[in-house]
Image (cartoon, coloured by chain):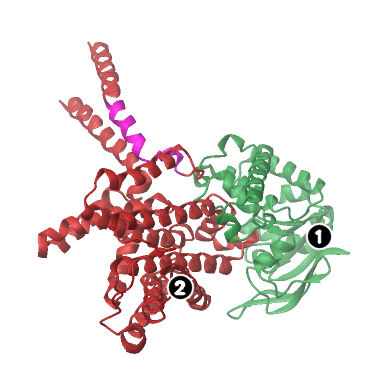
Chain colours: A red, B green
Amino acid sequence: MSSQATKDSQREFRKRDIFYLVPLWLLSLIAPDPYLYHKKEFNKKDLYYLIAICLAPLIWSDTHFHHLMVLAGIYAILALGLSLFMGYAGQISLGHAAFFGIGAYTTAILTTRYHIPTFPAFWASAVSAAVIAYFIGRPILKLKGYFLALATLGFGEIFLVIIRESTDLTGGVIGIFNIPWFSVMSFSFDTYLKQYYLIWGVLVGLFVFSKNLVRSKMGRAFLAVAASEDAASSVGINVPRMKLEVFVLGAAFAGLAGSLFSCVMSTANPEAFSLGFTVLIVMMVILGGMGNLYGPIAGAILLTWLTDILSRYQEYSLPLFGVILILLLIFFPDGIGTRLNVRVIYLIGYWAKKKKRDEGKV
Amino acid sequence: MALLSIEEITKEYDGIIALNRLSLKVEQGSIKGLIGPNGAGKSTLFHLISGVEKPDSGKIYFKGREITSLESYERSALGIGRTFQTLQIWGNMTVVENIMAGMHRRLKGSLFSYGFWLPWIKRSEKEALKEAKEMLDSLGLLGKWESIASQLPYGKQKLLELGRALAMKPELLLLDEPASGLTLTEMHQLSERISQIRQKGVTVFIVEHHMGMMLEIADEIAVLHHGELIAEGTPESIKRNPEVIEAYLTRRRSD
């Protein structure tokens, strides 16, 4: 009698296995494989992602979607740089928006006051953000943990005050208007669709750059610094310099993003670079997944889209946003980009086992 | 001439003297052991040699060059590799990456050359991977090369840490209690491995509690007690030295 029952349950289990395999296989096509996520080489999936990026604005060809994706792309560039600093090198920065602001204001001032074309201003933004990051980073990167968080937070606030008070240069709280569209050799990126390709092109370039770092000696050194600084210096990794390099690199990414942002919005004002914005970017990195380069992009798209959807609910939008973030952090503690299908497999396994448990009890 | 020589070194922590005017030499190509009861200053001495901490006074020479004021990473560039008493592998990387990160100093190239993946970077990364796999093969960890390092059992993690130190091709290898927490078989394998390392021309300096292993493999043993050197010599002479028995062995019996 009992052996008959076990046989039945086994047969049933096999049927169920096949039933679950189909959706799991479909999921595995879109989600990164959990058991391969530490393999850092480029593979076929990257090509699929690239094709999806190229086709997406043509399939959903409404301007609102294009505009959202332009913003998401800019945030993703920022989050990508921050993810190298936070997710890989294991440091904390709460002043990343300041470098975004430095990039935006560099472009704004150069193009409106000195009438320099946007393309050289774009590179100048990255350089100015990187140079400032170098001089800020040298002293404060000696700090660790909470102290580093506080120091970078302080830097962000000081930057805001400087921007607000130096009215002659930055236009104070009102900001700078009429920044021209981004243009290269008289080709102007004046529609959302063109801007989409511009920004996602820059993002893909920076992503490839970051991925090359991550899969090589540099990425190993970042991770080594994050895990144990003593061990890192025992194999000859110059820990302070490594931290400084990745900080400056993140700032340069932020400078590029800021430059693109000011060209797309055609304004630069201090409200866009506040602490709230930094927290949003940090949120993108954490939600997307630390120590994973796809994560910050996924996080940026998700949060931009979420803020847009929730803005319809007016005064309820912020509480709803908070609740959704908490739920995401509970169910995706490693971030949505890292372990999407691990979670899904876990949930399906849970349901399957739950049914079995209930049967056992009865 | 001695590979490493320590002269009159003193280190104090908040009024407690960890090392008191200690002088010590490690000869090229030898296996030197350092023993002593808990709190004798053995780990402090290792931290001072590898540069994790700086001495209050005294000088350290490596290959005839003074390294007292050099940073930790500069000393490892000169050829001082080490393992830690509390295991310090990088649990956020795979096994093979741990070894490859150990080669950090030998792989050249700036941030940008890596970011743009220049052709010679590709080549050197490939070679590094190949070399790391050979290293793992000799350690018997090749089967686990792709698993996350923190998922290995403790003994294998210790082995991995040793492999990482060897990957930087050191001239002097500092092993801080390599046998602690190992099973008896693992300990025998370890002694064999250390002898093999010495045959390749690497000088080994070991801190170890396990007397049996030390007497077996070390050419020379130094005994520390309360930050001072109380005896130095061949394993045979150390075993018979009354002061050592007084300081080390009787203390152990009372534990």
- Asked if the stretch drawn in magenta spans residue B207, the answer is no
Q: Residues within 10 Å of mark 1 (few under 14, many from 20)?
A: some
User: In which quadrant is the N terminus of chain A drawn?
Assistant: top left
Report the residue that reaches farthest toward the right: B1
Using the rendered image of the protein, determine whether residue A287 is visible from the camera's viewpoint. no
Indicate which disc residue A110 carries.
none
User: In which quadrant is the C terminus of chain A drawn?
Assistant: top left
Q: Residues within 10 Å of mark 2 (few under 14, many from 20)?
A: many
Mark 1 lies on a secondary structure that is loop
Report which quarter residue B48 is drawn in: bottom right
Q: Which residues are magenta?
A: A20-37
Residue name at image x 49 percent, y 55 percent: A210
- For the residue pair A207 and B15, the one nearer the viewer reads as A207
Rendering coords of residue B190 (x, y %):
69, 44
Amino acid at the residue labelled 1? Asn
Left or right, A351 with respect to B89, comes to: left
Residue name at image x 66 percent, y 37 percent: B137
| Secondary structure character of the magenta stretch overall | helix
> Which chain hosts label 1?
B
Rendering coords of residue A329 (x, y %):
28, 53
Mark 2 lies on a secondary structure that is helix
- For the residue pair A347 and A173, the one nearer the viewer reads as A173
- Asked if the stretch drawn in magenta spans residue A25, the answer is yes
Residue pointed to by mark 1:
B241
Residue pointed to by mark 2:
A129
Amino acid at the residue labelled 2? Ala
Using the rendered image of the protein, determine whether residue A49 is visible from the camera's viewpoint. yes
Left or right, B142 with respect to A298, comes to: right
Residue name at image x 61 percent, y 45 percent: B182
